[in-house]
Image (cartoon, coloured by chain):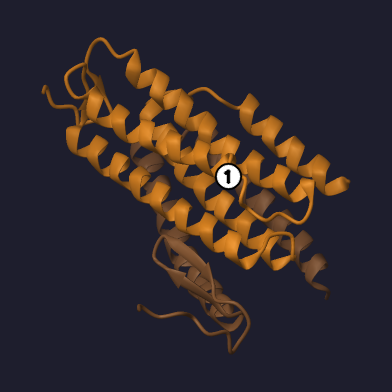
Chain colours: A brown, B orange
Amino acid sequence: MEANDLAVLLETLTVIQRLVLQYQINNGLTDEQLWAQGDEASQRRRDKNRARIEELKRKLAEENVVIVPGVEIDKGPVGTEIPGPK
Amino acid sequence: MRKSYLSLTLIILLLLSAGCGPNQSKAARAYAEIQTNLEGASDIVHILNKGGQLSNKSALSILTKIEVVGGLADKFGVRARELGAITPANKGELLQLIGTISGDLSELAQDGTLEFKTPEAKAKFVAAIALIQTSVTIVASFINNIKEPVPLAAGTFKEQ
């Protein structure tokens, strides 16, 4: 399966999941259940994003991009000399 | 093209479904929608990145920002339930959190440095952020108009 086909499949599944969750929100959930649904979505997002962020940082390190908290600096081609303090 | 129709249909369905069912408070419903849509936006970013439609650097930047917004949404949910009710006296605190969420989302949607490979990919991302913004706007307007204490969940109402 090509990356693009996989992306289409994943997108379709995401759309279906959103519809199911929205249907649940619209149909008779109590306040307690709504708060709980929000908490569960938050937990899922944090778990998935933690793994995704780690993977992206690893890929960028391989691509030779230095990540500083809040700032991203392109280090340039391998072997480029970075001037130090004078 | 078919994918675009699918996404568009979803957005229309979600917007049409705005409003509350019986026994639902707008705050609880908005919280569920904001969190569900933040998860959805993260999934879309991941899919666009995996499909080669968004650079690794931009995907990392967006997901990191979404986690910041998600942290604020978590704080809103926890604080609202601690309060038990929104009153004219305490609504400012919740409005401040909601305002920060809204500002961060606008910043993200308008970030011109994000590297999308096609206009369609960018449109999908902007639409995902717009869905969250809709819930944020609804709850902000609801809280802003509170003139008397509004309980947030059955059995948890406490006079402030």
Q: Which residue is mark 1?
A: B111
Q: Is A5 or B28 nearer to us in this picture?
A: A5
| Quadrant in the picture for residue B139 | top left
Residue extending farthest to the top is B147
- Which quadrant, please, contains the C terminus of chain B? top left
Label 1 crowding class (10 Å Cα cut-off): few <14, some 14-19, many 20+? few
User: Does A10 sit above or below residue A19?
Assistant: below
- Residue B112 in sight in this render: yes
Label 1 chain ID: B
User: Does B64 sit above or below residue A18?
Assistant: below
Q: Residue at x 58, y 41 (%)?
A: B109
User: Is label 1 in a helix, a strand or a loop?
Assistant: loop
Residue A31 on image: x %, y %: 36, 34
Residue extending farthest to the right is B1
Q: Is residue B69 left or right of residue A53?
A: left
| Quadrant in the picture for residue A61 | bottom right
Residue extending farthest to the left is B160
Residue A59 on image: x %, y %: 58, 78
Q: Is A58 or B79 nearer to us in this picture?
A: A58
- Residue B153 in sight in this render: no
Q: Residue at x 57, y 50 (%)?
A: B40
**Type of residue at label 1?**
Asp
Q: Is residue A48 left or right of residue B144?
A: right
Residue B111 on image: x %, y %: 58, 44
Q: Residue at x 16, y 19 (%)?
A: B89
Q: How many marks?
A: 1
| Quadrant in the picture for residue B145 | top left
Q: Is residue A30 left or right of residue A63?
A: left
Q: Is residue B137 left or right of residue B5?
A: left
Q: Residue at x 81, y 44 (%)?
A: B4
